[in-house]
Image: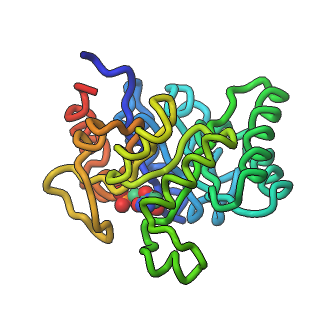
Amino acid sequence: MARRSNPVYCAVDTVDLPIAARLIRSVAGNAVPAVGGIKLGLEFFLAHGAPGVRYAFPAPVKATGIGFFLDLKLHDIPNTVAGGIRAVVELEPTYITIHTAGGAAMMKAAAETAAAEAARLGIARPRLLGVTVLTSLDKSDLESTGVAAGPAQQVLRLASLARNSGLDGVICSPHEIVALRRECGKDFVLMVPGIRPAGSATGDQKRVMTPSDAMALGANHLVIGRPITEAADPAEAAQAIARDLEAF
Ligand code: C5P
């Protein structure tokens, strides 16, 4: 079965604007991009803001139809998070992240604002994805913040709350895919980092999975950074991953 689109979002984690621009051009600037989307996060956005996004990821590259994941992990009172969302909708992100621990009212305000602002601008609504339990936290970290549930249970609780509060999906570890798919249904977006093609360096990622295994378990998108960005030829590295995923 032929795949509908490339599920890989390339994580561009740098504060160096020319390096980011060159990398994005190489993996996304061709008629057939080597990745399905670009992820820009806190590091890049705090350094360069919206003008940096417009420079590194210009309209002609976007026009290839490539996805744009703005990984801001917003977490504040509902009014402030809604204001933050409103400020970035004009960049036409496909996905924006917010923390589910901000609660139902915050998530609802974010979802309503994303839809309303996109409608006002006449552009596609950004999809909102929730961050549940950071993979850097273990059971004792949760206990120290007053959360008695273990990480696996808390991930499901927060994902369920996110779904009921109007979010489109969550970011999750490859090892959470099966339980989240069961809990949240087939239409809930699962965006999955912690991915390593067979044979590549794991770096600081501890519990990795290959791209095809994560897709087989039910991921919608994969976030892959260093195996692409640190390759001698990032476009070729991304194309090799895409070839491995042709069945999905
Ligand atoms: O280079 P690498 O493939 O490890 O990059 C993964 C990307 O996914 C980084 O941008 C990282 O911040 C993000 N991420 C992660 N693990 C999580 C959540 C996000 O690696 N649990």
Asked if residue 20 shows in the view, the reply is yes
Q: Where's the N terminus, which quadrant?
A: top left
Determine whether, in the image, residue 24 is placed left or right of residue 79.
left
Residue 248 sits above or below residue 183 on the image = above
Which residue is at the front of the view, 152 or 100? Answer: 152
- Residue 135 in the image: x percent, y percent? 43, 66
Residue 128 sits above or below residue 246 on the image = below
Q: Residue at position x 49%, y 79% from top?
A: 141
Asked if residue 25 shows in the view, the reply is no
Residue 197 sits above or below residue 125 on the image = below
- Residue 214 in the image: x percent, y percent? 29, 43
- Residue 123 in the image: x percent, y percent? 72, 26
Which residue is at the front of the view, 162 or 14? Answer: 162
Q: Quadrant of ligand 1?
A: bottom left
Q: Where's the C terminus, which quadrant?
A: top left
- Residue 195 in the image: x percent, y percent? 30, 52
Q: Residue at position x 20%, y 35% from top?
A: 244
Q: Residue at position x 55%, y 54% from top?
A: 157
Image quadrant assignment for residue 166: top right
